[in-house]
Image (cartoon, rainbow, N blue to C red):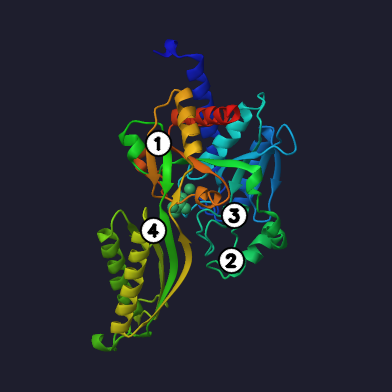
């Protein structure tokens, strides 16, 4: 009965409503009118970062931006040598994205910082808004969060986007100084840990009627850009047996990717992008470019699957008389979350009145990079139908409120340790 709603419920609803309003506000910033696409260092990323910085300042945080465009909203600790607890996620998106993948975690961190303003904490607090988690624009691998762990690879600066713009050029255009990237790494001894709230992007919490869950480990991932080179020719005159058709060869390779991914244990293998050149209906395709995204909870299974797929593509190319090249740009090992922080999130959820369960993450997250810096853990939030990387991605205000309350309580648990 509405009349029985407790003050706590009202507080949860208020936090949830505030979170949803903030996420909706950030969702306005897109590079493509009519749908949400916000790529790293794009005008939409800049506008979204400005809006996020304003939200951080409203929560009493001091805001800076690092040399890779990551926003840092900081609350100082009780002493200059106090450690820092990091909370964050990303504000870049995939193409035609949902609005919660990334921003939910940043907004929950900001609201938690706001809720904790009046309380003494034995550590400093930083809310981070990373810009290169999706790695959709440049051939990088969690570049902005990897930099905090000291893992930024200088060769990434020469990587180019679809228009031939290098990461270095895009950073300068964004107002960043690539020469200052060396200032970003954090001192592990001064870092208490990293917490990330994120939509589950899967169906488990909804199936178990749970608002939140705690991540045990994040699957490993391998990503590559591939090129198949055949020979352009007249579609009307070249006999079928005399062609070097790059697209027909690629089609056979893509079928191989799906077959091998299906057969491997707990693995997934995806070709998400495929372009054809010159791209005319009466020209035999001369070149294709396609991507590989291969993941598994066990690194040995993933390595074997990558080898099977790449050698299989080479064999198809050989038989068909086309050239095959593969440029690997990501090899992320599977990443276990920290037991102490997992327990703090579970205790926080219990204090917030939420049941939880432990579950693995099939999706990659900034927490993979941050776990190389400090103890890290993730709180998953139920999402409708498990749908993500899709504008139909959806959560409820009540679940958003439950996530904020869980995060606040988990910080309090850590403060008491
Ligand atoms: O692709 C992923 O797993 C994440 O959404 N970047
Ligand atoms: Mn994400
Ligand atoms: Mn994503």
Q: Which mark is residue 156?
A: 2
Report the residue marked by disc 3: 144
Whole-percent x and y of residue 170? 64, 62
How far across and how far down the image is residue 333, in percent?
45, 57
Q: Estimate the spatial distance between the alpha carbons at disc 3 and disc 4, rounded to whole Å.
A: 24 Å
Q: Is residue 1 above or below residue 221?
A: above
Quarter holding the N terminus is: top left
Residue 235 showing in the rendered view = no
Among the two numbered marks 3 and 1 on one chain, the one whose residue lies closer to the N terminus: 3
Residues under numbered marks 3 and 1 in contact, where contact means CB atoms less than 8 Å apart: no
Q: CA–CA distance between discs 1 and 2?
A: 34 Å
Callout 2: SS: helix
CA neighbours of label 1 inside 10 A, class few (<14), some (14 to 19), many (20+): many
Query: On the rendered structure, is 203 left or right of 363?
Result: left
Q: CA distance from mark 4 to mark 1?
A: 27 Å
**Which circle's residue, 3 or 4, is located before the other in the chain?**
3
User: Mark 2 and mark 4: span between their CA atoms?
Assistant: 24 Å
**Residue at the spot of label 4:** 299
Which residue does the numbered mark 1 point to in the structure image?
382
At a point 54% along the width and 35% down the height, the residue shown is 108
Whether residues under marks 4 and 1 lie with C-beta atoms below 8 angstroms apart, the answer is no
Cα gap from disc 2 to disc 3, whole angstroms: 11 Å
Q: Earlier in the sequence, mark 4 or mark 1?
A: 4
The mark nearer the N terminus, 2 or 3, is: 3
Q: Secondary structure at mark 4?
A: helix
Instruction: Please say if the residues under marks 3 and 4 sit with CB atoms less than 8 Å apart.
Output: no
Locate the C terminus and report the quarter of the image it occupies: top right
């Amino acid at each position: 009965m509405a009349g029985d709603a407790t003050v706590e419920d009202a507080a949860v609803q208020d936090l949830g409503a505030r979170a949803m309003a903030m996420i909706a506000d950030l969702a306005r910033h897109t590079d493509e009118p009519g749908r949400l696409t916000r790529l790293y260092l794009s005008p939409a990323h800049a506008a979204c970062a400005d809006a996020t910085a304003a939200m951080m300042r409203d929560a009493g945080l001091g805001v800076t931006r690092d040399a890779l465009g990551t926003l840092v909203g900081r609350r100082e600790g009780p002493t200059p040598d106090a450690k820092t607890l990091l909370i964050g996620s990303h504000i870049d998106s995939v193409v035609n994205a949902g609005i919660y993948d990334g921003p939910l975690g940043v907004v929950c961190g900001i609201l938690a910082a706001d809720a904790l303003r009046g309380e003494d904490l034995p550590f400093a607090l930083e809310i981070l808004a990373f810009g290169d988690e999706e790695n959709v624009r440049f051939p990088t691998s969690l570049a902005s969060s990897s930099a905090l762990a000291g893992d930024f690879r200088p060769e990434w600066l020469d990587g180019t986007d679809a228009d031939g713009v290098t990461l270095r050029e895009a950073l300068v255009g964004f107002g960043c100084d690539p020469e200052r990237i060396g200032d970003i790494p954090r001192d592990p001894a001064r870092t208490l840990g990293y917490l990330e709230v994120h939509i589950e992007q899967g169906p488990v919490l909804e199936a178990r009627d749970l608002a939140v869950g705690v991540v045990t480990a994040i699957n490993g991932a391998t990503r590559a850009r591939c090129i198949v080179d055949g020979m352009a020719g007249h579609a009307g005159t070249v006999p079928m047996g005399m062609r070097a058709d790059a697209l027909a060869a690629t089609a056979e390779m893509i079928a191989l990717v799906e077959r091998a991914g299906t057969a491997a244990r707990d693995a997934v293998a995806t070709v998400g992008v495929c372009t054809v050149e010159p791209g005319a209906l009466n020209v035999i395709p001369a070149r294709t470019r396609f991507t590989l995204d291969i993941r598994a909870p066990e690194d040995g299974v993933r390595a074997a699957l990558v080898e099977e797929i790449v050698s299989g593509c080479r064999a198809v190319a050989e038989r068909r008389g086309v050239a095959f090249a593969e440029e690997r740009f990501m090899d992320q090992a599977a990443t276990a979350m920290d037991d102490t922080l997992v327990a703090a999130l579970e205790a926080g959820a219990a204090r917030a009145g939420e049941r939880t369960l432990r579950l693995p993450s099939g999706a990659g997250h900034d927490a993979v990079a941050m776990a190389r810096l400090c103890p890290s853990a993730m709180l998953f939030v139920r999402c409708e139908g498990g749908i993500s990387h899709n504008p139909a991605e959806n959560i409820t205000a009540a679940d958003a409120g439950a996530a904020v309350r869980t995060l606040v309580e988990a910080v309090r648990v850590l403060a008491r340790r």
